[in-house]
Image (spheres, helix red, strand yellow):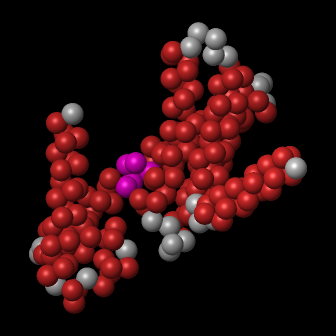
Amino acid sequence: MTWMILCLAGAVAVGFFGIAYFNGHPAVAGAVNQNAERVFIELAQILFNPWIAGILLSAILAAVMSTLSCQLLVCSSAITEDLYKAFLRKQASQKELVWVGRVMVLVVALVAIALAANPENRVLGLVSYAWAGFGAAFGPVVLFSVMWSRMTRNGALAGMIGLHRCADGYRLETVRLAGSVRNYSGLYLRQYRDCSV
């Protein structure tokens, strides 16, 4: 718990220091104004010796690479074991599963590269969508499994799929939400008027 508090305090401190520094020096704030997620990178390059800045930036790269390698392996093994072996080929040999796992690592890496290549995607936005889908899909299922004795496998599966679709639909429809609310309320009032006549 202590290390988590220290890490989060450091992240918040970098944000506040970035606000103070770049408000005081607007001439060097161009990259940060375009992408606020570059605050740490820009501060390290501006404020530190190039050797120290290189060490700080390599720390970011090391954290990204360690997380990426774990996520690639987890995604690959989940698809291979939980989808391919469980549903598609139950009698698959170990050699076949190894090759499917390797192909899945490549596929997941290509999807990640495609997402990262879009300059409109921001890390914070992608992570917030991922956690919204994760929380919506698994949160209620876990709570109902613990608190309700009549929870079934099919109910859990339906809840996960439906709630994930709700979170995904919310993300896709955020821009058009106001128009949808107006359309639905107008449709409801029209139906109410027709029924009451």
Residue 28 quadrant: bottom left
Q: Is residue 66 magenta?
A: yes
Q: Residue at x 29, y 59 (%)?
A: 60
Q: Residue at x 76, y 30 (%)?
A: 87
Picture coordinates of residue 118, whole percent (x, y)? 54, 71
As displayed, is residue 88 above or below residue 47? above
> Which of the pair 93/1 is nearer the observer?
1
Residue 92 quadrant: top right
> Which of the pair 125/53 is nearer the observer?
125
As displayed, is residue 70 above or below residue 142? below
Q: Residue at x 88, y 50 (%)?
A: 197
As displayed, is residue 26 above or below residue 122? below
Picture coordinates of residue 119, whole percent (x, y)? 50, 74
Q: Residue at x 22, y 63 (%)?
A: 15
Residue 176 horizontal side relative to residue 197, left or right: left
Q: Main secondary structure of the magenta part?
A: helix
Magenta stretch?
A: 64-68
Residue 168 seen in the figure = yes
Residue found farthest to the top? 149
Residue found farthest to the bottom? 27
> Which of the pair 194/30 is nearer the observer?
194
Residue 106 seen in the figure = no
Quadrant in which the N terminus appears:
top left
As displayed, is residue 130 above or below residue 98? below
Picture coordinates of residue 162, whole percent (x, y)? 68, 38
